[in-house]
Image (cartoon, coloured by chain):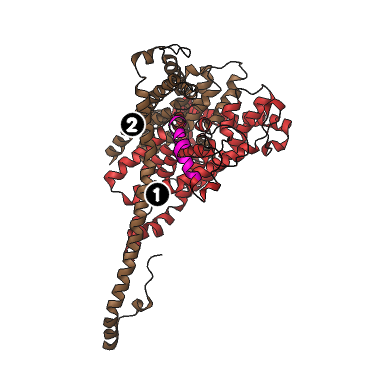
Chain colours: A red, B brown
Amino acid sequence: MTVLSGASDLASVKAAVRHRHARRGGRAYVVLRWAAAGIFAAILTGLVVSIAIDSSQAIAHSGIGFLWSGTWNPTANQFGAGILVVGTVVTTLVAMVIVVPIGLGTAAFLSELAPRWLASPLSTAIDLLAAVPSIVVGLWALLVLSPMFANHLEPFLKSVPVLEWFFHGPAYGPSILLASVVLSVMTLPTVVALSRTALSGVALADREAAMALGATHWQVVREVVFPGARSGIAASLTLAVGRALGESIAVAMVIGNSPSVPHSLLSPGATLGSAIVNQFAEAEPGIGTSSVIALAGVLLVLTLLVNAGGQALLRGMGPGRLRRRERHSITQVVA
Amino acid sequence: MIGAAPAQWRGEEAASSGDWEARERRRPVIQASARRSLGRRRRAGRFVQVLCVLATAIGLAPIVALVYYTAERGLGGLSWSFLTHAPVPEGIPGGGISTAIVGTGEIVGLALLMAVPVGLMTALFLHERRGRLAAAIRFGADLLTGVPSIVIGIFAYALLVRPLHHFSDLAAAFALAVLMVPIMIRADEEAMGAVAVDLWEAGVALGARRWRVARSVVLRGAFPGLVTGNLLAVSRGVGETAPLLFTVAAPSFAMTLLIYTEGTQPFPSEQQTAWSTALLLLLFVLVLSGIARLVAWRLTRRAR
């Protein structure tokens, strides 16, 4: 029965096949493929190395305290990323506070509650939000939302008894709050698309089992669907955090750009991204530029860590849980 | 927690008529309790349903508001001369954004020339190879997708602007290409994976060259998916601002930069230019991703 009776036969067949491929396999094609993969790997390495070189110059100048020092004063040659890191983390956190309930509620509605004829156009609409360039979101936030916030929303928030602790000081419009709202708008499609996919990936049999036990629709969603989609939801939130940390231009337009310790969500602030946008053109060649690039280095490390976590979670969802078409749509939206 | 059953429900089948009578007496009590429980659980469900509808309404508000305001404020400034005339200094009437449209076209075109071949060949590499190297490249592509665009802009500056001492479309295109390549790789590979493996095996078994199989089987079969993925990558690249900040010579040479500089001015005429450019950009990006979705939709419908 077996044609290849021994290891030596197998080896000779393999050698013949290899020889044949070498002759007829299209060397150019193989070389091109390797070249492309090599170019890509070189870009990745180049990105990290080039940012690391400049960052190390900045850290050689300012010391390791660059990472937490709170002063950013280019005229005095004092550089520190501390306040900017705080600003980045605060805006991202507030954005998450806004986007998590809205995003998960929307995902639950689209995946579990809405009839199909309604869910599919609404999902497309939310996905289209991901396609809107960040500069357009920034323009809208600066010229439409900002006056609206300064005149209506922010005075209202200051009048609410408990919330006023977060919202005091004058209401200009451009503020940490507005930047967080912009970030929540930009991360919403990521959260909705990935969570929705994770929710609808929960097996029908699991739902039916819960229904057979007498669970109502909402109980099925809460007890079976959400726990089953846990890792997918966690991945969506992590990737959203990654996006929020790295957004620069739209934030730079609305945060007011004042690198000082924020004492209220209504006060202007600055993030790593917004500081790079604003400081780079004015930076002195040499140590000034290197310090700004070091900010990019800090941002790179932050986002790489968060995204590596998100990717690990996404992989944890397992290929079996998601049908190919769904994975396809994930890569499109995450992109 | 799904409603916990009271202990008496779990009794075995009644053994004697006495048990049966006792159960008959309890029946109304049990039924009332079950009805109350179901009512409570249904009310909770309805409450959450309302919350979810509310969340969806809030979630849809930004896209509606964005499109509405951009159209409302941008439409007034759109005209043929706006598209075909170069920008003029502040205070002089007239002028348009022709240089920005051409500039964006050039930068994106150049970026595509760099990104599409690298993305396609790397995807073929990943498609035909397994193992650690492929896994590492795939992971690298996923990570690069998450790298902030401003960091990529800084990279292009450090690599192509600072050493050459001048800003250039080439550096901008390189930045956009770095941004688009990982998206293309993953989308291309995903599209190639959708082509049946036995077709590929059949091609190889016929003794066809690898390139011939890749061209006639993999690339042909994956074509609609490739179009979709690459179009989405383009629509992402067109709308990027941050990578161009440190690479393009002047704001009037790219649409997104023009929106940034004009939109942050306090003058109404500048803001008008920004809105109109934003509307143009938004239309282009939405049409592009609309086409991409249409291709993807036709693809899945045919597969069914």
> Would you place residue A91 above or below residue B285 in this image?
below
Q: Nearer the viewer, residue B78 or A325?
A: B78
**Number of marks in the image?**
2
Callout 1: SS: helix
Q: Up-down: is B253 above or below A79?
A: above
**Which percent across, then down, holds residue A237?**
48, 46
- In this rendering, would A93 be left or right of B194? right
Residue B223 visible? The answer is: no
Residue A133: x and y in percent read 43, 30
Q: Nearer the viewer, residue A187 or B295?
A: A187
Which residues, given as a range, are shown in magenta?
Answer: A142-158
- Quarter of the rendering occupied by the N terminus of chain B: bottom left
Residue occupied by mark 2: B290
Q: Is residue A145 magenta?
A: yes
Q: Nearer the viewer, mark 1 or mark 2?
A: 1
Decide: is B105 above or below B23: above
Q: CA distance from mark 1 to mark 2?
A: 26 Å
Relative image position of residue B32 (x, y in whole percent): 29, 73
- Name the residue: 66% across, 27% down: A290
Q: Amino acid at mark 2?
A: Gly
Q: Secondary structure at mark 2?
A: helix
> Circle 1 is placed at which residue position?
A105
A234 left or right of B206 in image: right
Q: Looking at the image, which residue is at 37% across and 75% down?
A: B6
Which chain hosts label 2? B
